[in-house]
Image (spheres, rainbow, N blue to C red):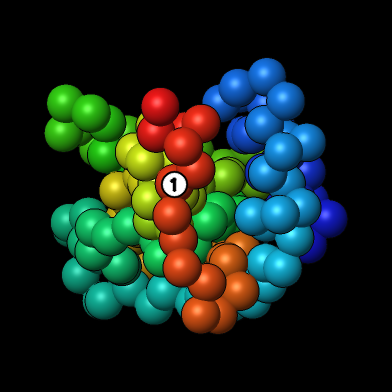
Amino acid sequence: MMKLSKKIIEIILKSLGTGYEKRFLDSEFGNCHGYMRIVNYTPPSNVEENQVEGLGMHTDMSCITIVFQDELGGLQMRSKDGKWLNIDPCKNSLVVNIGDLMQAWSNGRLRSSEHRVVLRRSRNRFSLVFFWCFEDEKEVIAPNEIVG
């Protein structure tokens, strides 16, 4: 997951500007670390009658978050106009979210996505979530080239 995370960051840096991956990948993101969580959402007994939140609206305090959700789905992202969009599970696919740390580092050029999990079925929902973060104690400052 560490190699995948670094590759994703490299692609993101390329999208921000020519040569940014060479300039910033190792110096800014070379000491990142990650941790994985296995998340089990247990639905209440009345889930068949109503859609309920398994996890309320939030953003992730990470650079990026990589999510694998089971076939039940339930992940939703909030669009710029405030609508909740379903992120349906696709076989052999992962979801990548920009986190709060990347939003801060990019001076807001990249936006930390507001998202939530809704439960629609009476079965438990599982997901694997990998959070990739700057090293502890790193002062997050947007580089002049990004602010510019």
Q: Is residue 40 left or right of residue 117?
A: right
- Where does the image place residue 45, in percent across and percent down from the top left? 25, 76
Reply above or below: 31 against 63.
Answer: below
Residue 96 occupies which quadrant of the picture?
Answer: top right
Q: Quadrant of residue 78?
A: top left
Is 64 displayed left or right of 100 in the figure?
right
| Disc 1, SS | loop
Q: Residue at x 68, y 19 (%)?
A: 18
- In which quadrant will I find the N terminus? bottom right
Residue sitting at 53 percent across and 56 percent down?
63
Q: Position of residue 39 (x, y in %)?
A: 52, 75
Res. 20 image quadrant? top right
Q: Is residue 33 above or below residue 49?
A: below
**Residue lying at 83% horizontally and 55% vertically, measured from the top left:** 3
Residue shown at the point (39%, 33%) measured from the top left: 147
Which amino acid type corresponds to the residue marked 1 in the rendered image?
Ala
Q: Can residue 75 be spotted in the picture?
A: no
Q: In the image, is 41 to the left or to the right of 34?
A: left
Residue for badge 1: 142
The mark tally for this picture is 1
Q: Nearer the viewer, residue 2 or 90?
A: 2
Which of the pair 56/130 is nearer the observer? 130
Dot 1: within a 10 Å radius of its alpha carbon, few (fewer than 14), some, or many (20 or more) residues? Answer: some
Q: Is 34 in front, or is 147?
A: 147
Residue 78 visible, this angle: yes
Q: Quadrant of the C terminus?
A: top left
In the image, farthest residue toward the right: 3
Residue 67: percent from the left, percent from the top?
Answer: 58, 55
Left or right of 147 in this view: 96: right
